[in-house]
Image (cartoon, helix red, strand yellow):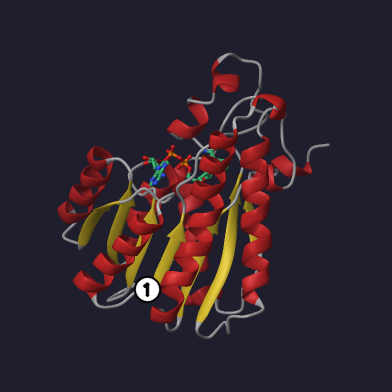
Amino acid sequence: MRFKNKVAIITGAGSGIGRATAIKLAREGAKIVVADISETHGESVKEEILALNESAIFVKTDIASESDLHHLVHQSLHFYKRIDVVVNNAAIMTFCPVIDVKLDDWDRVIHTNLRSVFLMTKLTLPHINGGAIVNLSSVHAHETTPNNSPYAASKGGVEAFTRAISLEIKPDKVRVNCVAPGAVNTPMLWNNPNIKSGREKIQGRVAEPDEVAAAIVFLASDEASNIHGTSLIVDGGRLAIL
Ligand SMILES: NC(=O)c1ccc[n+]([C@@H]2O[C@H](COP(=O)([O-])OP(=O)(O)OC[C@H]3O[C@@H](n4cnc5c(N)ncnc54)[C@H](O)[C@@H]3O)[C@@H](O)[C@H]2O)c1
């Protein structure tokens, strides 16, 4: 019960890696704030956690909206009176060459994947004492494929931002780190039109969401007490391939 009486906010907790992380943290005693744009998925994960006799609330949140993020943090403090762990997990992708990327789509990806990480940091830092922020990056921050430039830029930004703020935040107050997964068995992977069409082949093993959640939970825990401002790549060795 490493997280007994701790409170964890997880964005995109309605599906995939976010859901697996929410359930793992709840099993370890954390009270969970399930934040997701999808009410159906978010409510369903909240019910799964309640069925484990653990505590959870759902706050419908579009992380691209500044006012929704204020509401998320406000509701978390209103219900649980504290914040210990933040997992900035929700993200979106586009699938077209840079020349065809519409400005609105660029902004939507950057606001969802990167600006939300900045805002959640700003809004939650004053309330965390002895906790952790874990940001979801991707192997796309390091090596990528064609037609993913907004996503790759956002994930590179998440890693650089995390490294930069680690210089300003004392690790005994809040440790900040990234997890960078490779291919993971979630709707995000299988809804990718390049994967669906077979244009992009998945090299190697596809991880289960639980295997990424294990890394997130480790970085969020006191066992990672000397890990600050870095990225843990969880890709089954994918980045080693030339
Ligand atoms: N699945 C992979 O292969 C893979 C690989 C590398 C990195 N990642 C990263 O892992 C994280 C989780 O991805 P996943 O595969 O579990 O995705 P997923 O599609 O299974 O789940 C994403 C969740 O985020 C929610 N969401 C989407 N937009 C939102 C918004 N604006 N506000 C709030 N919630 C929103 C969705 O409703 C969904 O519940 C992402 O940051 C993603 O970039 C995933």
Residue at mark 1: 2
Q: Is residue 215 visible from the viewing direction of this image?
A: no
- Pick the residue in front: 62 or 31: 62
Residue in view at x 21 percent, y 58 percent: 57
- Mark 1: few, some, or many residues within 10 Å (few <14, many ≥20)? some
- What residue sits 55% from the left and 42% below the top? 107
The answer to whether mark 1 is within 8 Å of ligand 1 is: no
> Quick one: quadrant of the C terminus?
top right
The furthest residue to the front = 103
* Residue 118: image location, x then y, percent: 53, 63
Residue occupying image coordinates x 71% and y 31%: 145
Three-letter code, disc 1? Arg
Q: Quadrant of the N terminus?
A: bottom left
Answer with the quarter of the image where residue 59 lies.
Answer: bottom left
Q: Nearer the viewer, residue 172 or 97?
A: 97
Q: Residue at x 24, y 65 (%)?
A: 75
Evaluate whether residue 133 shows in this view.
yes
Q: Secondary structure at mark 1?
A: loop
Locate residue 129 relative to residue 149 in the image: left or right.
Answer: left
Quarter of the image holding residue 49? bottom left
Instruction: Using the image as rendered, state which of residue 91 and residue 13 is in the foreground.
Output: 91
Left or right of residue 80: residue 114: right
